[in-house]
Image: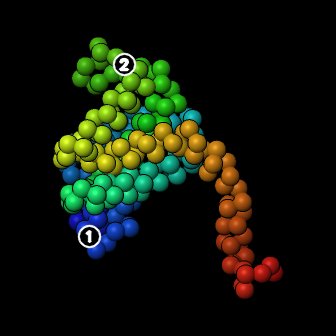
Amino acid sequence: MIRYFTSNPASKVLCSPMLLSTFSHFSLFHMAANMYVLWSFSSSIVNILGQEQFMALYLSAGVISNFVSYVGKVATGRYGPSLGASGAIMTVLAAVCTKIPEGRLAIIFLPMFTFTAGNALKAIIAMDTAGMILGWKFFDHAAHLGGALFGIWYVTYGHELIWKNREPLVKIWHEIRTNGPKKGGGSK
């Protein structure tokens, strides 16, 4: 569990935990909180992007937010394991808040206080930035911030740059799967 399902730049295994750690949690409460937020925002982003693009975004976000966490830990010298889906979930939350900034949100236990999605995103980014600068250790603030920034970038630019230009790569992939790789770099 510690070797493959927690991400840590000081570990001997660096790459696979960047994805696998998004599927492990410290406690039942940790998992429930993450799954509640994912459930709350996932239907909106699936409606915007579609199921396939959502899945690609979510899995990529897990890796990217863990990479940002690695960079933050190495830069500050604060090594230690991280786990959980919150970096990827922050991508989903930030993507929805960026696409629907005037959407109304509320905190689960305080539903009488509402705020816009755009303001919620600004507050979350400010809190995670402060957490990184001040060295707060309750959350992996670098992973949260990396996930949020990736979500903002993806819905603003990534869809056009990546998803809409995937067709040539998909054709090559299908050709390789159907005919096998080309030998010698030339055409058949």
SS category of the residue bearing label 2: strand
The vertical placement of 26 against 9, above or below, is above
State the quadrant of the C terminus: bottom right
Query: Gap in Å between the C-alphas at discs 1 and 2?
Result: 41 Å
Res 6 quadrant in image: bottom left
Query: Left or right of 8: which side holds 61?
Result: right
- Earlier in the chain: of badge 1 and badge 2, it is 1
Name the residue that disc number 2 marks. Answer: 115
The vertical placement of 137 against 106, above or below, is below
The vertical placement of 67 against 135, above or below, is below
Question: Dot 2: few (<14), some (14–19), or many (≥20) neighbours within 10 Å?
Answer: some
Name the residue that disc number 1 marks. Answer: 11
State the quadrant of the N terminus: bottom left
The residue at the point 34 percent across, 17 percent down is 114
Rendering coords of residue 93 (x, y %):
41, 36
Rendering coords of residue 134 (x, y %):
20, 42
Rendering coords of residue 46 (x, y %):
53, 38
SS category of the residue bearing label 1: loop
- The numbered disc on residue 182 is none
Q: Is residue 43 visible?
A: no
Going by the numbered disc 1, the residue's amino acid type is Ser
